[in-house]
């Protein structure tokens, strides 16, 4: 699911296992739900609407909704409430996440991130990781992507730089907030980075010269 807007006037999107999306708007305290729709509908050539699963949803700051499915399509809601396909032709890998804000529209797919160039209506593939990427998140100027085998990448000056996570477990989700970043993954693994976490680390750990691996259910700081 994805939520955008101020409390009491949110836009809410929920996807089910059949590739359908339900969109609702909150007015005060009661949500008003529209009809269930399947982006692509299965009738659009190359859209992959029929039989596809929605891999991720996102809501932009302007209230537009976005969806990616497992057949390589990206959709955006229109003013009329319909879904329009906006990419991605000949994409490699399987889409796992979509992130949108005022500056970015990014799709994680395999070892790449696809960046939407709004001015020219074009997608640019960016090679990021040797492992499959699973989720992207941003807070202010900090943009992070996480993936399999403990992969953590941070965007610095438009370059994706690998950050040492100290683990080899797959990371499924990441939240980037003010002063702290938290990723979660396989077997209950939790990875935290921030002033509080770094203060607990040895000098060797902070420089990456000491390597450890967490077991299922453990947590680590990096």
Image (cartoon, rainbow, N blue to C red):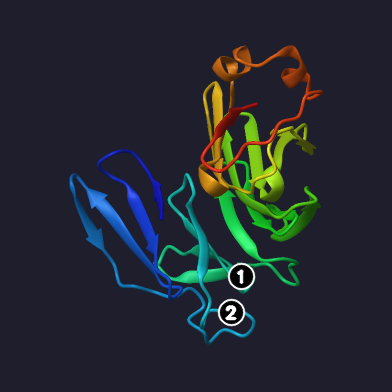
As drawn, 155 above or below 210: below
The residue drawn where x is 29% and y is 67% is 34
Mark on residue 73?
1
Rendered location of residue 86, percent (x, y): 61, 66
For the N terminus, the image quarter is: bottom left
As drawn, 193 above or below 52: above
Separation of residues labelled 1 and 2 (CA atoms): 7 Å
Relative placement, left or right, of 85 versus 79 is right
Residue 5 visible in rendering: yes
For the C terminus, the image quarter is: top right
As drawn, 47 above or below 183: below
Which quarter of the figure has residue 70?
A: bottom right
The residue drawn where x is 48% and y is 81% is 41
Q: Which residue lies furthest to the front in this view?
A: 215
Rendered location of residue 189, percent (x, y): 55, 40
Front position in the image: 121 or 175: 175
Rendered location of residue 17, percent (x, y): 43, 71
Circles 1 and 2, Cβ within 8 Å, touching? The answer is yes
């Amino acid at each position: 699911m994805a939520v955008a807007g101020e409390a009491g006037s949110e836009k809410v999107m929920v996807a089910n296992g059949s590739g359908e999306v339900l969109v609702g708007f909150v007015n005060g305290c009661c949500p008003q739900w529209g009809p269930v729709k399947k982006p692509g509908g299965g009738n659009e050539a190359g859209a992959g609407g029929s039989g596809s699963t929605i891999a991720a949803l996102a809501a932009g700051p302007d209230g537009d909704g976005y969806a990616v499915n497992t057949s390589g399509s990206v959709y955006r809601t229109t003013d009329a409430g319909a879904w329009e396909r906006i990419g991605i032709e000949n994409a490699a890998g399987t889409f796992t996440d979509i992130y949108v804000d005022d500056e970015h529209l990014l799709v994680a797919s395999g070892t790449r991130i696809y960046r939407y160039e709004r001015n020219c209506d074009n997608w640019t593939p960016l090679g990021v990781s040797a492992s499959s990427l699973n989720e992207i998140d941003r807070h202010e100027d900090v943009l992070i992507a996480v993936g399999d085998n403990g992969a953590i990448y941070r965007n610095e000056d438009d370059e994706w730089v690998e950050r040492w996570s100290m683990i080899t477990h797959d990371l499924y989700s990441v939240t980037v907030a003010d002063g702290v970043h938290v990723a979660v993954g396989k077997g209950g693994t939790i990875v935290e980075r921030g002033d509080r976490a770094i203060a607990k680390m040895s000098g060797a750990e902070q420089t990456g010269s000491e390597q450890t691996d967490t077991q299922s259910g453990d947590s680590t700081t990096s």
